[in-house]
Amino acid sequence: FYFAGAASGGLAAPTALVSVAARNLLADQSLEAAMAAPRVHHGGAPDTLFHEAELPPAARDDLAARGHALAATGPLGLVNVLSCAQGIPPHPESCDARSDPRGFGLAATADQ
């Protein structure tokens, strides 16, 4: 595989990028689904797990049952990604480039 990504958005940016990468590379989600999934972030201090409002209630209940103090927040990080599931390809159309739906970016690829 080939995966390149960048994120912005303060302390939650690395967490957002790793979340998208893990969903795409480990859970085999499409980039579109991985980018759209609700995000969580725990930076250590304060001892609060921040989550986007779209996080399903069942996930929030599970996290609270594990002892996490939860706080809803706005978007957590903005991510831009290029992923080629079969490695660097001879044909660029087999790659997928995405900009975060939380932002106003544009993802584009070019042929030769």
Image (tube, rainbow, N blue to C red):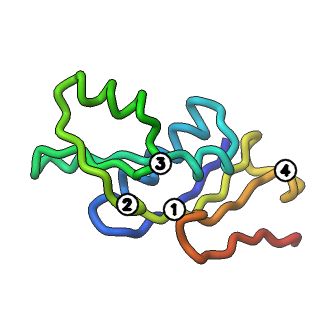
Q: Tag 4, which secondary structure?
A: helix
Contact check, label 1 and label 2, Cβ < 8 Å: yes
- Looking at marks 1 and 4 on the same chain, the residue that comes earlier in the sequence is marked by 1
Q: Name the spot of residue 83 as percent of width and height, x first.
A: 67, 51
- The residue lying toward the viewer, choosing from 24 and 68, is 68
Q: Amino acid at mark 2?
A: Ala
- Looking at marks 2 and 4 on the same chain, the residue that comes earlier in the sequence is marked by 2
> How far is disc 3 from disc 1 in space, using C-alphas?
17 Å
- Disc number lying in front (3 or 4): 3
In screen coordinates, is 75 left or right of 65? Answer: right
Question: What crowding class fits label 3: few (fewer than 14 Cα within 10 Å), some (14-19), or many (20 or more)?
Answer: some
Mark carried by residue 13: 2
> How far is disc 3 from disc 4 in space, using C-alphas?
30 Å
- The residue lying toward the viewer, choosing from 25 and 101, is 101
- Disc number lying in front (3 or 1): 3
Image quadrant holding the N terminus, namely top right
Q: Name the spot of residue 82 as percent of width and height, x first.
A: 66, 58
Contact check, label 1 and label 4, Cβ < 8 Å: no
Question: What crowding class fits label 4: few (fewer than 14 Cα within 10 Å), some (14-19), or many (20 or more)?
Answer: few
Q: Tag 2, which secondary structure?
A: helix
Q: Amino acid at mark 3?
A: Glu
Residue at the disc numbered 3: 54
> How far is disc 2 from disc 4 in space, using C-alphas?
27 Å
Residue at 55% x, 38% y: name it.
23
Q: Amino acid at mark 4?
A: Ser
Q: Name the spot of residue 110 as percent of width and height, x first.
A: 82, 72
Mark carried by residue 79: 1
- Looking at marks 3 and 4 on the same chain, the residue that comes earlier in the sequence is marked by 3
